[in-house]
Image: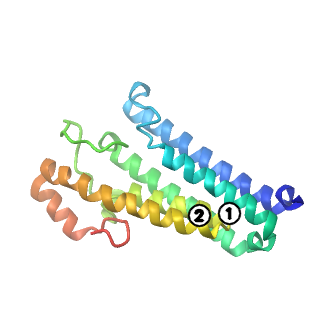
């Protein structure tokens, strides 16, 4: 049980805490700066019961595994790969938010607003949904950083499935808003989420 208070656990758990804290606080700050504080709440930041449960499960997995199988957490190259994924995912997501500006919202818009433009420059040149790409990389990276094999697999499946369902729904409205311009953009630019066209 002393492994929970050892160097490995302190390093990995502090990196996880900082990653989660920075992710959500910077999401809030950017959303408030772009849309105004009055339009930002926990619901708009997609913090759901399922998300909280997943994070709690990952912490539980970490504690159980470090207590029973401490060697599992000592693969520094895996943990460091996860840290790199967290940083890359964070950068991609924040670039997407900043590039889209007022056109970026956490909730899918079902009505076209005057300031809602089709963004195809910056990171959107490479992916139609770079914020989803970034979140997928970030979320799986947090679990690889903790050397959590169960949660890493679970996060990859659940987050991928969430976006695989969300992207067609969102793109239905984007096609209504932007017509052939969006069709052309979708044909030449991948979604950014593997196996989602």
Q: State which mark lies toward you, 1 or 2.
A: 2
Q: Visible in this render: residue 84?
A: no
Mark 2: secondary structure: helix
Residue depicted at 51% across the width and 49% down the height? 51
Q: Is 63 situated left or right of 82 in this image?
A: right
Q: Is 189 situated left or right of 53 in this image?
A: left
- Quadrant position of residue 112: top left
Residue 146 image label: 1
Residue 57 image label: none
Q: Position of residue 87 (x, y in %)?
A: 57, 59
Q: Label 2 crowding class (10 Å Cα cut-off): few <14, some 14-19, many 20+?
A: many
- Measure the alpha-carbon separation of dots 1 and 2: 9 Å
Q: Which residue is mark 2?
A: 151
Q: Is 72 situated left or right of 145 in this image?
A: right
Mark 1: secondary structure: loop
The colour mode here is: rainbow
Q: Position of residue 145 (x, y in %)?
A: 65, 64
Are the residues tagged 1 and 2 within 8 Å (C-beta)?
Answer: yes
Q: Is 75 situated left or right of 93 in this image?
A: right
The quarter of the picture where the C terminus appears is: bottom left
Q: Nearer the viewer, residue 102 or 66?
A: 66
Residue depicted at 32% across the width and 39% down the height? 102
The quarter of the picture where the N terminus appears is: bottom right
Residue depicted at 72% across the width and 55% down the height? 13
């Amino acid at each position: 049980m002393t492994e929970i208070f050892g160097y490995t656990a302190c390093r990995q758990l502090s990196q996880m805490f900082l990653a989660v804290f920075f992710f959500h606080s910077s999401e809030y700050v950017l959303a408030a700066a772009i849309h105004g504080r009055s339009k930002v709440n926990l619901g708009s930041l997609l913090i759901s019961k399922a998300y909280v449960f997943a994070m709690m499960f990952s912490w539980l997995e970490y504690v159980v595994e470090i207590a029973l199988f401490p060697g599992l957490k000592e693969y520094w190259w895996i943990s460091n790969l996860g840290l790199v994924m967290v940083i890359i995912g964070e950068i991609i997501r924040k670039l997407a938010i900043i590039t889209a500006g007022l056109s970026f919202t956490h909730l899918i818009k079902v009505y076209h607003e005057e300031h809602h433009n089709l963004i195809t420059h910056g990171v959107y040149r490479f992916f139609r949904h770079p914020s989803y790409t970034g979140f997928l990389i970030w979320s799986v990276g947090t679990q690889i950083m903790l050397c959590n094999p169960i949660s890493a697999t679970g996060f990859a499946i659940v987050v991928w499935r969430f976006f695989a369902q969300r992207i067609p729904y969102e793109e239905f409205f984007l096609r209504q808003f932007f017509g052939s311009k969006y069709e052309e953009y979708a044909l030449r630019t991948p979604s950014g989420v593997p196996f989602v066209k």
